[in-house]
Amino acid sequence: MQGIGSRPKLLVSTDGSGVVGRAGARLLADLADATGLTSAYSTALRRLRPRGTGHDPGRIATDLAVMLADGGETITDLAVLRDQEGVFGPVASTPTAWRLLADTDEQALASLRSARGRAREIAWLQAAEQSEGIPAARAGGQELPGLVLDLDATLVTCHSAKDQAAPTYKGGFGFHPLLCFLANTGEALAGRLRPGNAGANTAADHITVLDQALAQIPDAHRHGTDILVRADSAGSAKAFLAHLGNRREQGINLRFSVGYTITEPVRRAIQAVPDRLWHPALDQDGTLRDGAEVTELTGMVDLKGYPAGTRIIARRERPHPGAQLSLFDQDEGLRHRVLLTDTSYSGGGSAQFLEARHRGHATVEDHIRTGKDTGFGRFPSRDFAINTVWLELSLAAIDLLAWTRVLLLDGELATAEPKRLRYRLLHVAARLTRGGRRLRLRISATWPWRSELATAFHRLAALPRPAA
């Protein structure tokens, strides 16, 4: 029998000096300064600073966003930054941060959103200065032109009574926020906090979130750039798709790809398609997917009330074990999915490619999952207005992580999820030393990702700064 190796014996004391934890989180704080987020927040919240004294409200908001990006779950987790003043400087107390959240009204919240949009414009300009700019989203083995916006709702469980928390359609209790992510980078463009009983397919909420997301896109990209909006069947409301057409008339080149409910006319159309007109589906790498087929139903289903040029595409595949099947699927022995899109044939819109492009919408589930670990998985207050501000700061935290990947990292870390970034970069311990009138952060020479973290700090220092 092989023996189990023993760990080195330790003597624990509390007399260490100059040692700091979560040293890598300073990268996020400095990036907020470099993109102008901190200064923009300061301008947006200036009127909330009593007589110009105390902590700057914009700095408090930035520290909260950094804390959330670092994995904090409650406002008391701000103490992790506050207790390391040598790295993060003076950080507001928990009561002070609470007062800021409570004092942020609708006007201040709108200013926070605008401030985040201004910081995004600077971050994208910095990306263009460094490389090719914002990366392209991919689907079906191809790069998608322009920008891809993914809208989806999620359920957030509350374990206590909170303002506007309500029973959900899954039998739980809590909130039902609607969110929009940029598939190209994983940035969180917009979010709307809603009661748990809010409808999944409410067109008005989709319109609000989409408009807020478009406002977050810098002018140079919002106009003159192809923008694809993807959603599940909740986004197929005629009013929402009509709104996309209205925005297109205003000079924004919006196109849509949304799920569609399989109604009785759709079932009849699927059954009427001969087998020879079903074509192999594509995987996301562009190869043929075994057991899955795609066909076009355009002209076979009445789409009255939908935008002109709307196409309807169906997919069928052998169900995987445990798949939830409708009665129609059980009768056919296959799982079916249907989508609507206004991408034309001449625009490179083969049914196979468009179906693969739409399935790329599934990445929004990953963004939501990691977003729940970056703030909006738990809401701290009984007050709905405070929780709305918390959601906005969570979106800022997600943006900071996305900008870190795009601007400062290479290789696998450039696509890493927040948890990996935290364990490898943000939570690293280091030693603070002073010499030559300079403060140095010394990362352990044995830490496996020391070079990546040091390179990120060097790239951050080299970023062009916005004009004052």
Image (cartoon, rainbow, N blue to C red):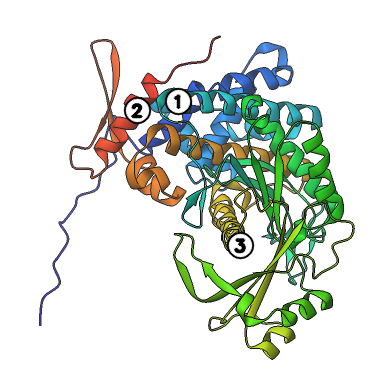
Name the secondary structure under disc 2: helix
Q: Which residue is mark 3?
A: 355
Q: Quadrant of the C terminus?
A: top right
Q: Which residue is mark 1?
A: 30
Residue 58 spot, x, y in % from top left = 62, 23
Which residue is nearer to you in this view: 119 or 393? 119
Give the amino acid at mark 2: Phe
Which of the 4 quarters of the picture holds residue 60?
top right
Which residue is nearer to you in this view: 60 or 457? 457
Name the secondary structure under disc 1: helix
Q: Rounded to the nearest whole Å, what is the CA distance between mark 2 and mark 1?
A: 9 Å
Q: Nearer the viewer, mark 1 or mark 3?
A: 3
Q: Quadrant of the N terminus?
A: bottom left
Q: Rounded to the nearest whole Å, what is the CA distance between mark 1 and mark 3?
A: 41 Å
Residue, x 46% and y 48% (percent of image)? 418
Which of the 4 quarters of the picture holds residue 36?
top right
Residue 143 spot, x, y in % from top left = 49, 47
Q: Is residue 206 left or right of residue 151?
A: right
Give the amino acid at mark 1: Asp
Q: Is residue 266 left or right of residue 124?
A: right
Q: Which residue is mark 2?
A: 457
Name the secondary structure under disc 3: helix
Residue 56 spot, x, y in % from top left = 61, 19
